Image (tube, rainbow, N blue to C red):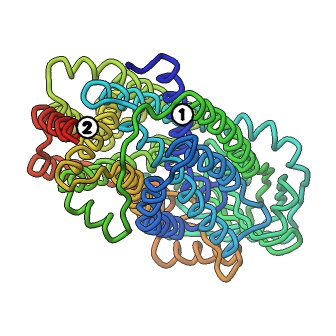
Amino acid sequence: MNLTAKEKLAYGLGAVGKDMVYMLSASYILYYYQDVLGVSAVAMGIILLIARVFDAFNDPIMGVLVAKTKTRWGKFRPWLFIGTLLNAVVLYFMFAAPPSLDGGGLVAYAAFTYILWGVTYTMMDIPFWSMIPAFTKGGKERESMSALGRTCAGVGSAIVTIVTVMAVAAIGGAASGRSIDHTVTLKDVSVTAAQLDDAGNTTGKVTELKGTHSITVSANSDEFNKPTAYTQSNTKYTLKIGSSEFTQDDSSVTLAIDKEDGEAVMLIYLSADEYAKIDANTSVTADITSKREVERLGFKYFALIIAILFFLFTVITCVGIKEKSTVNMQTAGIGDMFKALVQNDQAMTMVITIVLVNTATYITSNLLIYFFKYDLGGTGWMGNYTLFNTFAGGIQILAMMAFFPLLRKFFSAIKVFYICVMSAIGGYVILFALAFTGTNTVYPFLIPGFFIMAAVGILNVLVTIFLANTVDYGELKNGRRDESVIFSMQTFVVKLASGFAALVASICLSVFAISDSATLEAVDGSMVAGLNKVISDIIASGATVVSGNSVIGLRFVMTFVPIIGLIIAILIFSKKYILTEEKVNEITEKLHHTASAE
């Protein structure tokens, strides 16, 4: 019996919710903890990678547990329901870090919730994709359902990619109006001005301004109870330096305070012309309103909305999908399971390919928000970022729904894979060129966005189809169906790729000083001491703000590194993957003949 429209809708909605959650975590967890909460970029990169290494043990074990499950509701749905409920709860808490935490406590909270999120995500992701061989026939029906699942997953990813930044700003703005409840006029403020060259790099020249200063800060009262830094990116401010007036749109300022009635340090970056206008007696007036609460509360409540939708969509999947055929899955111990996986050379080929392809694209997605915020920049960076993501998300969905079926009419699945990887490489080459031409408008970047995201959309469908085919291949070769094991590896390698990508991105942010958190970190628990260290570094070595060579490093990592990863992926795939359509049909016929004989 063919799949009904109700079953397809139920499975599709589950895929939408599942990837909404995954994309929120994969693309924004680094930004949330680093730029919003101030955790060290390197610390976050290490946390994300450790979590993925932990999954190396957790994911296959979960695959075995699923394989051994026997209930009146089937093998997959109980885990799908329980995993989704737990993961939705953890997602909320992961983006709802208590504002009272700082330093080591915040790092520990981030590590614990993120690792727990990975465990609970595995609980629902493995059974979700493992269901496909259990309720579909081989060949076209399985390919069709895999394509549907991946298309709907792409819709979920695109929704989160498109709306997150604007939704967080809107939700956080509404919520923070009640939480920004305290205004402090700082009494003991040390103000230093640093000179910038034409490229935006500090020259090493600084002047301590000893005039009469009036600095007021409006924020949540909790912010004044711990070391805090206010910068161009997390505040709205007006600034008067002598007779010159500035806002956050045309200046760069960092203010560090450790507690409400303690010492405060302000560092102001000035162009050579503005720097020439000041002297030691220049006075500074600043009125600063924190936006830290906007993003903190925005992510908290946005994550809650996504978590609720995720749970509701999965409930629909559990109600609407049932296993149509009984698959006698032989269970295996952990040692036997890894042995079987290693013996399935086609599954291993796909595992390596998926890691390389996803690492390449995740590096770009992790760094993209920093590219728009700190490189293209400007007051409209959020709008430009949203526009790009809207276009890219639309192309990804269109690719899965229209481009993939169209290409399949003329090419085999393997040839479509080659076309897509070459398209992505071409897109990155164009992106690389544009990034180094000094283009300061978003529209030219839509061209490489088209080639890259169209490829990503189709590749998401193809890897699921290829993995499903390796299940039959493994059964014929090893005498055992290991769909849960193999699809657990898909879950693992996708998360492993996101871990590698996050580590690469965090190292990039730290080495090239791409964000304020990377250039300013607390010293012995003191943010004031941290900013004083930055000032000392500028005097000693001309340490710079986010510009010049910093953004060159950002551009290089988000374009050239993915190109290398994709080239390696296509070389490995071309040499090792042998499951052509003819080979898959041959395997299906042999399995059918064996089952009939039994």
- Disc number for residue 424: 2
- Of residue 353 and residue 177, the one placed in the foreground of this image is 353
Q: Residue type at mark 1? A: Gly
Query: Which structural element holds mark 1?
Result: helix
Residue under label 1? 14
Identify the residue at horizontal 44%, vertical 58% (top origin).
502
Residue 576 coordinates in the image, percent (x, y): 12, 51
Q: Is residue 386 visible?
A: no
In the image: residue 456, left or right of residue 38: left
- Disc number for residue 73: none
The crowd level at tag 2 (other Cα within 10 Å; few <14, some 14-19, many 20+) is many
Residue 277 coordinates in the image, percent (x, y): 63, 56
Label 2 to label 1, Cα distance in Å? 28 Å
The crowd level at tag 1 (other Cα within 10 Å; few <14, some 14-19, many 20+) is many
Q: Residue type at mark 2? A: Ala
- Of residue 493 and residue 41, the one placed in the foreground of this image is 493
Does label 2 or label 1 sit earlier along the sequence? 1
Question: Most extreme residue toward the bottom, as rendered?
Answer: 524
In which quadrant will I find the C terminus?
top left
Question: Most extreme residue toward the front, as rendered?
Answer: 598
Q: Are marks 2 and 1 in contact (CB under 8 Å)?
A: no
Q: Disc 2 or disc 1, which is closer to the eye?
A: 1
